[in-house]
Image (cartoon, grey):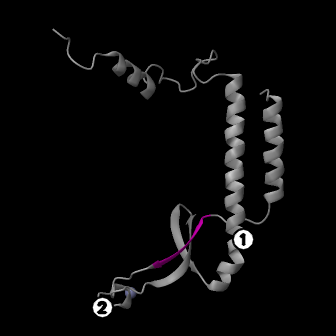
Amino acid sequence: MEPTAAQRAALDKITAEIAAAAGPALPGTLIVRAYACGKPNCRCRADPPRLHGPYAEWTRKIGGKTMTRRLTPRELAEYQPLFDSAKKLRALVNELQDLTLEIIEADSPPQAEPATGDLRSGKRGHSPLNLWAARQSQPIHPAHA
Ligand SMILES: [Zn+2]
């Protein structure tokens, strides 16, 4: 991995931003929304509708299951910066990963076949890309007369 001077500068910038943003961060997503319930004669079904909420809902995976928890206004005020912090860190890490990909792909272009052999053992010649290429090489219409 040999970053160029510009890539090195970009790496330093992103890692410094990550260090500056590092702090307590919560997993999952926070959505604040108002909604209509299922009761037919409720105020949320009136014209104009008066929806329930808005409520702050924290959704995340716990043991492979998606769980949603409603936050109190006090919890929302307390946790909001921790969600913001997590979001910022995720964006920065994505940027870092894109940049790192750019650097390693400049090293070994992805279109070149690796000389060290195929890691997807037994799948050689049957990848979706190869099938697609084979299909593309066939005439779309029967031979023209
Ligand atoms: Zn309702």
Above-or-below relation of 121 to 20: above
Mark 2 closeness class: few <14, some 14–19, many ≥20 residues within 10 Å: few
Q: Earlier in the sequence, mark 2 or mark 1?
A: 2
User: Is residue 137 one of those drawn in magenta?
Assistant: no
Say left or right for 107 vs 126: right
Above-or-below relation of 128 to 50: above
Q: Amino acid at mark 2?
A: Asn
Above-or-below relation of 36 to 59: below
Name the mark on residue 41.
2
Query: Magenta part of the protein: which range?
Result: 28-34
Residue at 72% from the left image edge and 31% from the top image edge? 103
Q: Quadrant of the N terminus?
A: top right
- State the image quarter where residue 61 is shown: bottom right
Residue at 59% from the left image edge and 18% from the top image edge? 112
Report whether residue 79 is seen.
yes
- State the image quarter where residue 134 is shown: top left
Query: Which residue in the protein does label 1 denote?
Result: 81
Residue at 61% from the left image edge and 18% from the top image edge? 114
Measured in 3D between alpha carbons, the distance from the residue under mark 2 to the one under mark 1, in whole angstroms, is 38 Å
Q: How far from the left and from the top, in percent, is residue 41?
A: 30, 91
